[in-house]
Image (cartoon, rainbow, N blue to C red):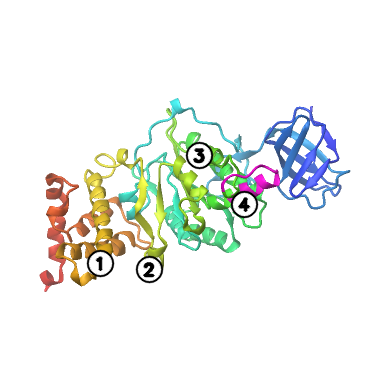
Amino acid sequence: MILEHIGLSQISGSLVILEDVPGVAYDEMAELHLDDGTVRYGRVVLVEGNRCVLQIFEGTRSLGLANTRTVLTGHPMTVPLSPEILGRTLDGLGRPIDGLGDIYPEVQRDVNGAPINPVSRVYPRNYIRTGISSIDCLTTLIRGQKLPIFSGSGMKHNELAVQIVQQANVADGSDFAIVFAAMGVKNDVAQYFRDSFVSADAMSRVVMLLNLANDPIIERIITPRAALTVAEYLAFDLNKNVLVILTDMTSYCEALREFSSSKGEIPGRKGFPGYLYSDLASLYERAGIIKGKEGSVTQIPILTMPGDDITHPIPDLTGYITEGQIVLDRGMDALGVYPPVSVLPSLSRLMKDGIGAGYTREDHVMLSNQLFASYAKVQDAKALASVIGEEELSDSDKKLLAFGRAFEQRFIGQGSVNRTIEQTLDLGWELLTMLPRETLDRCDDATLDAYFEPAKTRAAAQSPAAQG
């Protein structure tokens, strides 16, 4: 039996308190009916005996203590789902905002999802091609992986997110879809995302959820959960390989901090709640592959590091939970290198089992190891040149610096070009020809004979001296 509770005990900001409410459950949804006929929605965020606290999505303006009528629905928040959800633009709660009408659901799913039994998980293999060399070659994204992008305020992470949406696909040609969730973005950024996807004719495979900066913080807290609920439906009901992009997780965490403060909870590091780790884990651990299911959920959370501090609680805890990270570099961004991926602190912990023969190409593992090793030596040569001057360097160090400049400008700084994995790997070998063969200590002779020597021959044939 559904009861209607008349009156509120207390209103505090976006929170309202109800007394004498037996049987109420945490996360239960509520409808608040006003005298003018409007209905607002809330969620139970705290239960103390027969007393509960509701967070109101639309705010508490015009609510009255005496005459507000509250109905507890008896179920948590759900998202309506059907195959027609592809190509739609939704708000942070999963409601259509594109003017194309309501979604007629086949199923309604709890936004909190269901934990994946670890025994049912399949180890992630096979890769998702992004068309971006620094990711595909050096920090390969594996299906079912969670691989965050650590950026900074004002850097080009939005452009990178759009490029990934436009270019990403799977090698075996299976069904592929993207769920894109933006949290706390300004109107012009939201419009940029919309226009970019439409102009690239990518909306047919995208579900976009937009939570704007002026939307309630409780909606921002729901947005990634709604996005992942949509992704799980597409992956495990419709058998699609789904890539979920969540930007910006820093906005989400700051909304969580504000929400925690409004409830009077004791703050932890930098004011964030003590349960920030477990809250982020409840989102990130919804990525994966389930035994017996053809689909997969892969995550790319994007976060801006406050003050470019990688030890800040948000990137720090994200790094503990996820399987690697892609770090963007402000210095490279200032030099106009796009995408400004900082290679050395970036890694993908699962790439070793999803690349190589049968997945990308047999030389991929050795090539990526060699590029990492050679680029690390470039940093040593740069440090030495800053002390004694580039003119005083040895010939080998000068070759390293030349390789480093070409690697940053041509391999990392590819612009908006969409490269196949073969083009990326071939370019890597071409750049390594700038170094003597004997310095390539991460590759065996058979691989060097098969890939390095032909690349060296092609580079020599294309040199100005040969053409002259």
Depth check: give the residue in front, 350 or 381: 381
Q: Nearer the viewer, mark 4 or mark 2?
A: 2
Assess disc 1: are there few (<14), some (14-19) or many (≥20) residues with their C-alpha within 10 Å of its C-alpha. some
Q: Magenta span covers which residues? A: 254-269
Residue 84 is inside the magenta segment: no
Mark closest to the chain's N terminus, 4 or 1: 4
Magenta stretch: dominant secondary structure? helix
The answer to which of marks 4 and 2 sits earlier in the sequence is 4
Report which residue position mark 1 lands on: 385
Q: Which residue is mark 4?
A: 100
Residue 158 % position (x, y): 48, 58
Q: Secondary structure at mark 3?
A: helix
Secondary structure category for the residue under label 1: helix
Q: Quadrant of the C terminus?
A: bottom left
Front label number (4 vs 1): 1
The N terminus sits in image quarter? top right
Q: CA distance from mark 3 to mark 2?
A: 40 Å
Q: Which residue: 59% across, 51% down?
A: 254
Between disc 3 and disc 2, whose residue precedes?
3
